[in-house]
Image: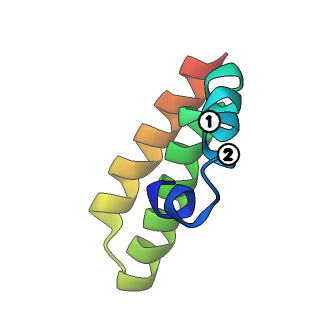
Amino acid sequence: MELKNKQLSKSAQPWIKRMEKKHPPKLDYHSELRNWIECVLLQTEKNKDFKKKNQFLSLLEDIETSER
């Protein structure tokens, strides 16, 4: 964001900072982590590493149960 702010006019910078404070981005860590694990699972299947696949499947199950 710093690079963008440097390119904007000086009058736009305070407005952007106020908007960022009023509306902080919502982060859904569970979905981000779930997506990452799914990518890792695909990679483990590709590499035929079943031990790691089982570990990540277990982790994925834990995440899903913690969301409930």
Quadrant for residue 35, please give it: bottom right
Q: Nearer the viewer, mark 2 or mark 1?
A: 2
Q: Which residue is mark 2?
A: 11
In x, y percent, where is residue 17? Answer: 60, 34
Q: Which residue is mark 1?
A: 14
Q: Nearer the viewer, residue 63 or 30?
A: 30
Mark 2 crowdedness (10 Å alpha carbons): few <14, some 14-19, many ≥20: few
In x, y percent, where is residue 67? Answer: 62, 21
In x, y percent, where is residue 38? Answer: 54, 59
Q: Looking at the rendered structure, which numbered label has been put on residue 28?
A: none
Q: Residue at x 64, y 32 (%)?
A: 20
Q: Are marks 2 and 1 in contact (CB under 8 Å)?
A: yes
Three-letter amino acid code at disc 1? Pro
Three-letter amino acid code at disc 2? Ser
Q: Residue at x 39, y 50 (%)?
A: 56
Can residue 24 be seen at all in this image of the molecule?
no
Q: Is residue 46 above or below residue 42?
A: below
Looking at the image, residue 60 sits to the left or right of residue 12; the answer is left
